[in-house]
Image (tube, grey):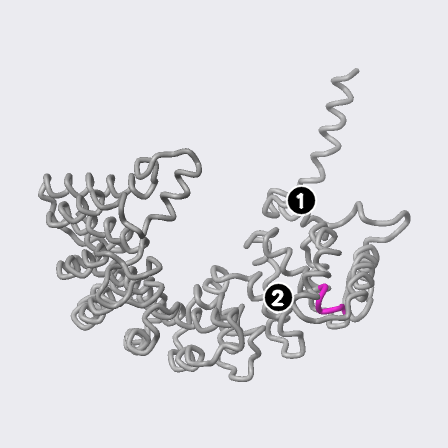
Amino acid sequence: MLKILVSALVFSIIPQFTSAEESPAANDGYAVEEPPLEDLEPGESTAPYKAGGVKVSASLRKRIQELEKIAAGEKGQDDAALERISGEIGGKLALLRFNNELVEVLADRDVDWRVRYLLLRVKKFMVTSRSVEKRLPALKTILADRTQHPRVRGSVALLISSGLAKEHADIREVMTAIAVDTTAPAALLEPVMAVLGGAGIDDVDRFLEIMNRAPGSFNEVGINLNAIRSLCRSQNPKAPELLMKILEESAPDSFFNVTAIEGLQCMIVSSPERRAALVPVLTPKLLKMVDDRSYMGASRNYAAELLVRLNVREVYEPITRWFLPAGEDRMPVKDSGGGAADVFWGTRLLADLCDKRGIKAMEDVLKKYPADTRFTWEKENLIERGLKFPEGSVHYKRIQEHLERLKKCVRENRKATWHKGQGYRY
């Protein structure tokens, strides 16, 4: 009798998944994206009807109205207000199925923009690119609609993501139009540039304008940085020149310099033609940056890393100067060494460079490590935890590993060879 009941149950379930559109597996494995049949009230029809200018089922419309009612209790429109609203309705938003009806709700300007914005933000982390791709035409309409709230449009851009923008020219065109629009608000430009930073467009003149804009807040720096990232992927012949310009004009320890170095590195390792043209001009600039003594030091670290990848042997001396005693506060000052981070970077880079002179340099670092004031914070932390210093230091052990790797490289007399996408490797 039990077997009969089980068989009947199995065969009653199978017909629900006879079509690819209805199957949760075919719909990216997200059962929450299926039609909300169980949400219907007794006797309610599944047929859509007009409500607020949008075709949605009665059950979904009712849920949206309930969410709007909760959101109406918060009058604010800023980030703090959005976070408070999210705390109230975030869980309910996550339960809504991402399907065609929900996308119709996202397009409805009569629905509180804050609810739609938060809904997009939640779904960004719940739905797959395949599910989004199936609804691209409707999402594209929202993105291109100037009458929509900028934050809703921006969230649609993030939901689409760089991968889909790169694959679909029509989506990329809409985003490009926003990027070149000098009247586009930061709330829209920032997420669009985040997507285009991965998808890439070739309007380098517009990128230059975006890079030079004055950020209205620290968060808006991302707009400038993503313009640089887009420039890094550009095939326009002017792109390398503009990246070099950033290196010359930006503060040594700025985000812009680091991003530009990463972009130039990408160009060099991916294109033999650009490598031949860029390396002779770029090398002196990078060597100068390696000897920079600005506060953070990220630029000198990334500059040295690129020079090592290019097998520029002249970088050895400036890297070893990082090992000298640092200035006060463990941060580098003029005529001094680097900070603690510079020591860790430097030992790794010398091992990558496979220069036998680095063996003595690293042995000196290990010998002086216990008394080096740059690692006092680490010593205090280890002793407090009942561990020995420097034996218990992860960084100390890592430098020992770098030293052994360098010795092996020198012992085997390895020669550097160029590997596309990696630079010179031993």
| Viewer-proximal residue among 75 and 399 | 399
| Magenta segment, prevailing SS (helix, strand or loop) | helix
| Viewer-proximal residue among 230 and 36 | 230
Q: Which residues are magenta?
A: 111-115
Q: Amino acid at mark 2?
A: Leu
The tag on residue 139 is 2
What is the quadrant of the N terminus in the image?
A: top right
Residue 304: quarter of image = bottom left
The answer to whether residue 170 is seen in the rendering is: no
Q: Is residue 137 above or below residue 214?
A: above
How many discs mark residues in the rendered view? Answer: 2
Apparent side of residue 150 relative to residue 6 in the rendered image (left or right): left
Residue 153: quarter of image = bottom right
Secondary structure at numbered mark 1: helix
Q: Residue at point 29% right, 60% down?
A: 301
The verdict on residue 408 being magenta is no
Q: Position of residue 184 (x, y in %)?
A: 56, 80
Question: What residue is shown with label 1?
Answer: 31
Which residue extends farthest bottom?
183
Q: 10 Å neighbourhood of mark 1: few (<14), some, or many (≥20)? A: some
Q: 10 Å neighbourhood of mark 2: few (<14), some, or many (≥20)? A: many
| Viewer-proximal residue among 283 and 103 | 283
